[in-house]
C-alpha cells in the first residue's frame, strides 16, 4: 500500500508539470486564433490538456482516499497542511477541472471555438496555479 501511495504521489506531482505545459500551450494557441471560426481539433493542445487534467483528477481522487494529509476530525481545520489537502486543494481543483471540461465541450459546439476554450482554460490556469502546494507554501510538498 505504501509503494502504491508513493507511485501515485509521484505521478500526481510530476503530472502537474505536464498539465501546466499543455495548459499554457493551449492558452497561447487559442489566444492566437481568438475571434476566428474553425474547428477546435486544429489546436490539439486543447484536447491534450483535457485528457491530462482528467487523468490528474483521477489520480488526485485516489490519493484523497489514501493520503494521511486528508483527515476528517477535530484537527482538520486547525492544521494548515491537513486543511489545505482535505478542503482547499480538492475544492479549487474540482472547480478548475470542471472549467476545463466545460471549456472543452463548449469549444466543440461553438462557432468561435477558440474563444470558448481560451476563456475557460485561462480561469482554470489561475485556479490551478494558486491551488498547487508549491514548496514555498510549506505544505510539505516538493517540486517533483
Ligand atoms: C490539475 C489538478 C491538480 C494539480 C495540478 C494537483 C497538484 C498537486 C501537487 C503538485 C501535489 C503535491 C504532490 C507532492 O507532495 O509531491 C498534490 C497533492 C495532492 N493532491 Fe492534487 N492536484 C490536482 C488535483 C487534485 C484533485 C482533483 C484531488 C482530489 C480529488 C487532489 C488530491 C491531492 C491530494 C490528496 C494530495 C496530497 C497527497 C499527499 O501528499 O499525501 N489533487 N496535488
Image: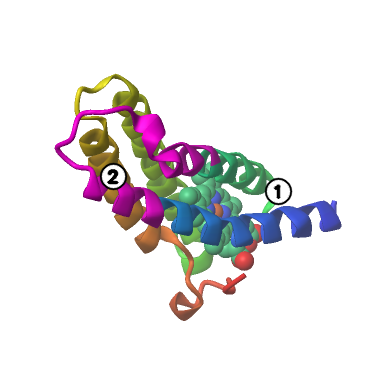
Q: Magenta span has 38?
A: yes
In the rendered image, the vertical position of residue 113 relative to residue 80, given as above or below = above
Nearest the viewer among 74 and 116 is 116
> Magenta region, mostly helix, strand or loop?
helix
Q: Magenta span has 42?
A: yes
Q: How crowded is mark 1: few (under 14 residues within 10 Å), some or many (20 or more)?
A: some
Task: Determine if the C-beta at disc 2 is less than 8 A from ligand 1.
Answer: no
Quadrant of the rendered structure where residue 20 is?
bottom left
Nearest the viewer among 37 and 108 is 37
Q: Residue at x 59, y 47 (%)?
A: 60
Residue 103 appears in view: yes
In the rendered image, the vertical position of residue 4 relative to residue 114, given as above or below = below
Q: Which residue is drawn at 46% across and 64% down?
A: 78
Task: Determine if the C-beta at disc 1 is less than 8 A from ligand 1.
Answer: yes
**Residue that badge 2 annotates:** 30
**Residue that badge 1 annotates:** 66
Q: How is the image coloured?
A: rainbow
Q: Residues within 10 Å of mark 2 (few under 14, many from 20)?
A: many
Q: Is residue 125 left or right of residue 113?
A: right
Q: In this view, does 51 lie to the left or right of 123?
A: right
Q: Identify the secondary structure beneath mark 2.
A: helix
In the rendered image, the vertical position of residue 109 relative to residue 76, given as above or below = above
Instruction: Give the percent coordinates (x, y) of residue 3.
Output: 84, 57
Q: Which span is picked out in magenta?
A: 24-51
Q: In this view, does 49 lie to the left or right of 65?
A: left
Amino acid at each position: 500500500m505504501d509503494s502504491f501511495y508513493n507511485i501515485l504521489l509521484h505521478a500526481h506531482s510530476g503530472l502537474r508539470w505536464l498539465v501546466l505545459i499543455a495548459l499554457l500551450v493551449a492558452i497561447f494557441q487559442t489566444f492566437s486564433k481568438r475571434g476566428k471560426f474553425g474547428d477546435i481539433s486544429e489546436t490539439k493542445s486543447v484536447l491534450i490538456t483535457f485528457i491530462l487534467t482528467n487523468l490528474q483528477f483521477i489520480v488526485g481522487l485516489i490519493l484523497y482516499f489514501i493520503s494521511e494529509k486528508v483527515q476528517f476530525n477535530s484537527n482538520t481545520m486547525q492544521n494548515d497542511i491537513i486543511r489545505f489537502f482535505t478542503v482547499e486543494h480538492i475544492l479549487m481543483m474540482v472547480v478548475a477541472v470542471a472549467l476545463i471540461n466545460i471549456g472543452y465541450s463548449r469549444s466543440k459546439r461553438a462557432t468561435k471555438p477558440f474563444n470558448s476554450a481560451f476563456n475557460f482554460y485561462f480561469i482554470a490556469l489561475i485556479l490551478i496555479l494558486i491551488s498547487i502546494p508549491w514548496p514555498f507554501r510549506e505544505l510539505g510538498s516538493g517540486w517533483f
